[in-house]
Structure formats: C-alpha cells, structure tokens
C-alpha cells in the first residue's frame, strides 16, 4: 500500500516511575501481522512489579499488532477486518458549533493516537485495557450531512454527501440513522475495543452526545487453519470480490484524489453504513441447495455455482442439463457483480451484530454493512438500486438503519482529523 497505515512501530511510556506497580508499556519486536503483508511490532500494557521494575513480558503477536494513526489515509479503511468493533454516531449538543467541533476532533485524535500505540487514554483512563497491547486497534472519524449546517460550513459540504435515495427495501429507523459525527472502532480484542469506545464517549464531554451505537464482531484471527474470507451469520463467505489495495484502480475507486474538491477531502473516502437485519429463522428453513441458489455460490467454499474456487469468476452464461442458468438470474452474486453494475465498486468492511431477540422472539442479528468508496453515487447507489429490483436475498434481510459520512484523509503528525476543514 502507498500509505503507512499498516506499518508498525514500538511505543514507549516514559511516565512509568521505577519501583511503582503500575501500567507500563513494554515493546516487542518481530510479531507477524495478519493480512495485507503487515508486520506487527507493537507495545502493550503490563503490570510492573515493585521489586523488579525492569522485568518485561513479551506480548503475543495478536496483542502486539499496531496500526499507525498518522498517515495519508485514516486507519480502519484498508486495515484488515478486526474481530471486534463499535460504530457510533454523535450529534453536537445545542449551542455547539465549529469551535467546539474543532476542540472535540483535537481531543479525539490525541486519544486515538495514544490508544492505537497501546498507551493509556489519558489521566482519566479506565484501565479496561490494562495488560493488553494495541491489538490492531483503529479509530476512524467522519462527518455527516447535518454537521456542516451545525458548524456554519455548508459551503464546504462535499457533493458526495448528498442524501442517499430511498430504496424499496428500506425500513429505516431515523433514530438509528445518520448523525453529525461518526466514529468507527475496531480491534482484535474485545476489551481494547470497549476501552476505546469509553474513551471516545468521555472525550465527547459537553460537546456531543451519542445518537446511536451498534456493536459488532467478526471471526478472530487465527481461528481457522489458514487465512480466509470471513463468514456472515447466514454461514456464507462474505467479501470474496472486494477490491484489493494491489489493484491498479484501487485508490481511484476508494479514495478522493489529492486534487479533488473540496480540498479538505483529499485522500479521504465516503462510507455508507447500513444496519441489515437477517431473517435467520426464515433463512435457516431453506435447504443448503436453496441457500446456494439465493447467493449464487457454494456455501462450503464460496466458489460460484458455475464451478472453480472462491476467486474464480462466475460463468453467468453456463446452463445445466435442463437448459437453466447454473447461477440463477436473481442470485445475489450475479446482481452485485461490478461488471453487472457499470463497474461500480466499493470496499466492504462489515461487522456482524447480535442484539438479542425482537418482540416476536426472532434473532435481532445481521450485518453492520460498511462500505468505502470515492463517490457513493458511483459506488453504493447503483449496486443497491439493482439489488432493490430483484435480488433473491432481499426476502431474507431488512435494511433497518442507514448513514452516509464523509471521512477526511489522515491527520499529519501534530495535527488532528478534519483540521483542514475546521481551520481552513
């Protein structure tokens, strides 16, 4: 990758006093990362003995993996998907404007930098992540459509942030949609992720309040015999055709160019967030073959029904002995393919969620769909419109909440996310 997001570096805690049993940050070297060729060498919390202040305990590679906060792009976009996540939207409180928003983003950025390095959040740290390393923690910030009116920055609102159109399959709860500010937290340890969530909430102080929050999870790194695409709660391999940073056109499709407009969005991206509940009771009534026909792929391997492996391009014209299409005409894999949508592409980076049961006793569970693109009108919108018109999967899902946010480029060392917008 061109940016520095996946690089790792040791961190230090110079404030730890000798002879005092307290949190100390202990560096480790040579830990191997989990994807995209990242190499982890990080640092984490450990309790130092009062009688042996110099004693050091190496972290496992999972805890030592560190993602850099500063860089060309914000972390949490091309970072490999983490095992735990929290996605939160905030609204500025009445009377808060541009000045308060700038102070908040400055606080959030400083906290994110510390936590992603495996350091305490600050003087009021909760100790939730004591003994843990960075654990691939990322914290990502974005702005909603309403943020610009609240801060008097309407002229700086990017065109890509125009509200999404209504879709036939939408059953949206406005209270759990949109928001002035958006924060995505991901980590490979649940306590590290929760620790970051509490720090972000506390930093909001009197400037912003939580509008909605969704907590998610993915398979933990190392849970399978070899690295593989994750599965969703329907048991399907999900994310096979994701764009890769090694693709020649990856940056063009996912990130706003440095010469883009408005200038403050240079190297940024737009994220669409959809809470999609899966009707698991209905889905699980289907035989495996019927499920595969809905998706257009074999459930066991993710390979297209037309043959091959997971990464084999489906043969959409192949027919069976009876003359029927092997990949059904309304299969999800057929309808969502980029070449069936004018080349539209987006980087999907979701989490699964499970929030108990609904009033009728069915699982309140599904996919927290998160996708990244340089322009939502050329990425998410055309694909969703086509899915809306005839995707076989639509009978088994409900789009219950939605949000669109502008995510600026990464912060420079000594700066904060959104500084070019809020101080420009």
Image (cartoon, rainbow, N blue to C red):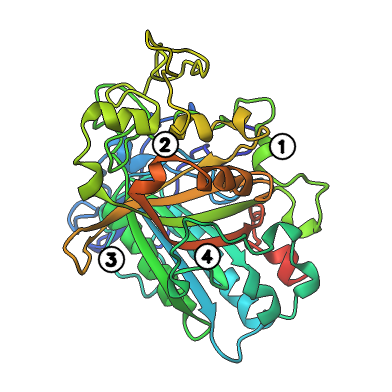
Task: Name the residue furthest front.
Answer: 322
Q: Mark 4 vs mark 2: which is more N-terminal?
A: 2
Which numbered disc covers residue 145? none
Q: Which mark is residue 41?
A: 2
User: Element type at marker 2?
Assistant: loop
Relative side of 104 to 14, left or right: right
Q: In the picture shown, does residue 235 fall above or below 380? A: above
**Label 4 sits on residue:** 182
**Nearest-to-viewer mark from 1 and 2:** 1
Residue 233 locus on image (x, y percent): 28, 43
Q: Tell me the SS state at disc 4.
A: strand
Q: Quadrant of residue 149?
A: bottom right
Mark toward the start of the polypeptide (1 vs 4): 4
Picture quadrant of residue 130 = bottom left
Cβ–Cβ under 8 Å for marks 3 and 4 = no
Q: Position of residue 137 (x, y in %)?
A: 41, 50
Query: Which of the two marks, 3 or 4, is nearer to us in this view?
Result: 4
Q: Which residue is mark 1?
A: 252
- Mark 1 residue element: helix
Please state which of residues 287 and 383 is positioned toward the viewer in this rendering: 287
**Residue 10: x, y in percent?**
45, 43
- The CA distance from mark 1 to mark 4 is 23 Å
The reply to whether discs 1 and 3 touch (Cβ–Cβ < 8 Å) is no
The foreground one among 21 and 204 is 204
Separation (CA) of disc 1 from disc 3: 41 Å
- Up/down of 110 relative to 392, above or below: below
Q: Which residue is mark 3?
A: 127
Q: Residue furthest bottom?
A: 95
Mark positioned earlier in the residue sequence (2 or 3): 2
Q: Residues within 10 Å of mark 3 (few under 14, many from 20)?
A: some
- Please give the name of the residue rendered at 32% of the width and 34% of the height, measured from the top-left corner: 236
């Amino acid at each position: 990758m061109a940016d520095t997001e996946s690089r790792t570096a040791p961190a230090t805690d110079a404030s730890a006093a000798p002879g005092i049993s307290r949190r100390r940050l202990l560096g480790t070297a040579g830990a191997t990362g989990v994807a995209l060729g990242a190499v982890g060498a990080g640092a984490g919390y450990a309790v130092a003995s009062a009688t042996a202040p110099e004693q050091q305990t190496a972290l496992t590679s999972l805890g030592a993996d560190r993602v850099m906060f500063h860089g060309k792009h914000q972390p949490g976009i091309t970072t490999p998907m983490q095992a735990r996540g929290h996605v939160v939207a905030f609204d500025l409180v009445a009377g808060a404007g541009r000045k308060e928003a700038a102070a908040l983003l400055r606080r959030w950025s400083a906290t994110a930098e510390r936590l992603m390095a495996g350091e305490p959040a600050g003087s009021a740290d909760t100790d939730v992540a004591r003994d843990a390393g960075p654990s691939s923690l990322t914290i990502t910030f974005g702005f909603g459509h309403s943020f610009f009116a609240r801060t008097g920055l309407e002229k700086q609102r990017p065109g890509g942030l125009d509200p999404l159109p209504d879709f036939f399959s939408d059953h949206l709860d406005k209270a759990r949609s949109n928001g002035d500010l958006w924060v995505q937290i991901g980590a490979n340890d649940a306590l590290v992720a929760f620790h970051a969530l509490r720090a972000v909430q506390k930093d909001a102080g009197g400037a912003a309040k939580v509008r909605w929050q969704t907590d998610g999870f993915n398979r933990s790194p190392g849970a399978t015999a070899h690295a593989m695409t994750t599965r969703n709660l329907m048991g399907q391999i999900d994310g096979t055709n994701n764009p890769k940073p090694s693709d020649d056109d990856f940056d063009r499709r996912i990130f706003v160019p440095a010469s883009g407009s408005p200038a403050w969005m240079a190297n940024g991206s737009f994220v669409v967030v959809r809470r999609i509940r899966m009707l698991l009771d209905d889905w699980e009534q289907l035989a495996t073959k019927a499920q595969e026909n809905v998706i257009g792929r074999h459930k066991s391997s993710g390979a297209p029904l037309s043959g091959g492996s997971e990464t084999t391009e489906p043969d959409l014209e192949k027919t069976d002995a009876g003359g029927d299409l092997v990949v059904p005409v309304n299969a999800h894999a057929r309808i969502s393919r980029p070449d069936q949508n004018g080349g539209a592409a987006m980087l999907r980076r979701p989490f699964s969620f499970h929030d108990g049961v609904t009033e009728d006793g069915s699982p309140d569970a599904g996919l927290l769909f998160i996708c990244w693109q340089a322009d939502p009108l050329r990425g998410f919108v055309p694909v969703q419109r086509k899915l809306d018109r005839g995707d076989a999967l639509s009978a088994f899902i409900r789009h219950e909440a939605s949000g669109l946010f502008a995510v600026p480029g990464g912060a420079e060392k000594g700066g904060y996310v959104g500084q070019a917008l809020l101080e420009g």
